[in-house]
Amino acid sequence: MKQRVALNTKSCTDHQPGNRCSERLSRFFSSPEFLTAVGLQRFSPAVLASHLPSLLPRHWKGKQRVPAFGGGDAAGLPEPDWFVRLLRFAGPENLHLFAQWPVVPLTSGELCSGAAVPSLLSPPEAPLPFASRPALGNTPPVEILPLAEAEESNSVREQCAAARTNPVLTALQRLGCPLLHPAVAHLAPRTESFPAAAAAALGRLEVGADGLAGRTALSPQEAVSLFELLARGFGERQLDAAALPPLRRLAIFETRSGSFVPLQGTERFLCALTAAGDLPSDQLLRQEADGEGAALLRALGVETLDELALLERFVLPRFASLAPARRAEALDQIASQWPEIEQRPALVEQLRAQPLVDLHGSLLRADQLFDPDKALLASVPDLSLLPLALPRKVTCCGGTAGFQGRSGVPHWALRGAGVACNSPQARLAVVARRPDVPPVCTPRPTILRAGPRPGQTLPPCCALSLGSATRLGGRWIDCACRTFARSRWRGRESGEAKWCRWLESL
Amino acid sequence: MPQEESRERFAAFVADALEYCLLDLSAHATTRSQHFRALLGARLLPLASGSVFCFPYDAVVASAEEQKLMPVLRDSFVDAR
């Protein structure tokens, strides 16, 4: 009877309003020994996991990711907050129990399995910096799965706001990176480097037939912010080499035309932002040639073009279509940078074959040029007469080779490259003294004057003929070519006398 | 509702009776597992569904919050109150 009285007094001390169970009784139900003895089991994450088939669609089992609240059929599913409660109850240490079941909510409203959590992107704890570029375009806002109950927490609410508005996070979500919902961010292991995690998540994205470019439409601010995040991570050595190649698929690289393009497909280049403005801006990236951004681009295989490389790749191929002022600018560049050009055999070859000098509306190659400064040559009314007037045999001094015609055709020896008049139609053939200069037939005789004088300022059309044309295969008359045989002149006597005087005057 | 009220009273009685038995068994049994086994066969296990079952029963002990996670197990949960 004493015990009964004691029981009654204690049984009224309920530890929660509305509870019949006394603290003493609840202690019994907390005792594993008691539960085992009477065949009861304590509710646990394992028990919860074992009963998931009765709550979720059975075909979800084994799926890594299901649409669920992100565009899927959510009818009959527990409310979104239920998944948060479930995972909070289970805790990260029991995530393996849900490896087969998609119960982890993403910001997109999709659900991922516990096994997929390591591959998810966890929202950063600290706010991410982003580009100050205006958010242009018609990019729609990013909607994330609303979790009213979970967002009562300040930290979750702030992280949800960031997921909706931070350009880096919105960019990643638009690109398809699975971002763990901030309400369950505790499930993922702490992210040491968000740029590295972002790069890894981007690398795991599935690529369609058109790459990633057609999948998303990032705003300029998003694209620049994401690029800057990755560049910062690369600069701080947080991105490993394996993470880089997939980044080439992203349309986050800004060109000089203002568009955002991937690096794959079309070759893109870096160059100084001060480079001339009429270059093909879709192929040139808008990025300072130094700094983190440029370093990342170079690591992604983007070639940096200096002024001469730009000339070689973009200016020369469309030289004929350039405005006269731009042509003159290019010729000035060639003349002023000739010492550097000489170090680039490919560029020299390109210049050699390139019609560059405008003469009366026609662009001529260097080896087609006449010396504009030689009054005597300029006065020659018909250069087709020239070979007829030349001596058949030329003896050169100063180490220059002389040439003897094989069939009575007169020859003319020049320094650097011999020029032979091999037909009455004045077609000249270059006989290269240097083995690396192949013989070239030119339609018109080419006579260039001697090299430029130091400090001489020349008009663009002369720049090549004087400074570099010789090196490009242009020919100029050897001033040492003064002595020649006069035994077999052709033409009239007056013509012979004229050409003799001229040659001696050289 | 009279029926609801009487069910509540019965549940309260069962809880008191179970606690009484457990205290009594704890005081007299030589080993703890032995005194718990004495409950087998006693109809003193209240479930969340309002039913009372005999020990042993394959039921799950969970708090009210935990029971909300698995509403489908209502018939298997021990009455949380």
Image (cartoon, rainbow, N blue to C red):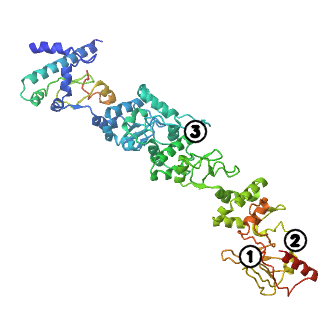
Which of pointers 3 and 2 lies earlier in the amino acid sequence? 3
Which of pointers 1 and 3 lies earlier in the amino acid sequence? 3
- The residue indicated by pointer 3 is A221
**Neighbours of disc 2 within 10 Å: few (<14), some (14-19), many (20+):** few
Q: What chain does mark 3 sit on? A: A
The quarter of the picture where residue B49 lies is: top left
- The residue indicated by pointer 2 is A376
Disc on res. A415: 1
The reply to whether residue A143 is visible in this rendering is no
Secondary element under disc 2, as helix, strand or loop, is helix
Same chain under badges 1 and 2? The reply is: yes
Residue located at (69% from left, 51% from top): A276
Closer-to-camera residue (A84/A497): A497
Residue located at (87% from left, 85% from top): A489
Whether A253 is drawn above or below A184: the answer is below
Kindly report the distance in space between the C-alpha atoms of the residues bearing marks 3 and 2.
65 Å
Q: What chain does mark 2 sit on? A: A
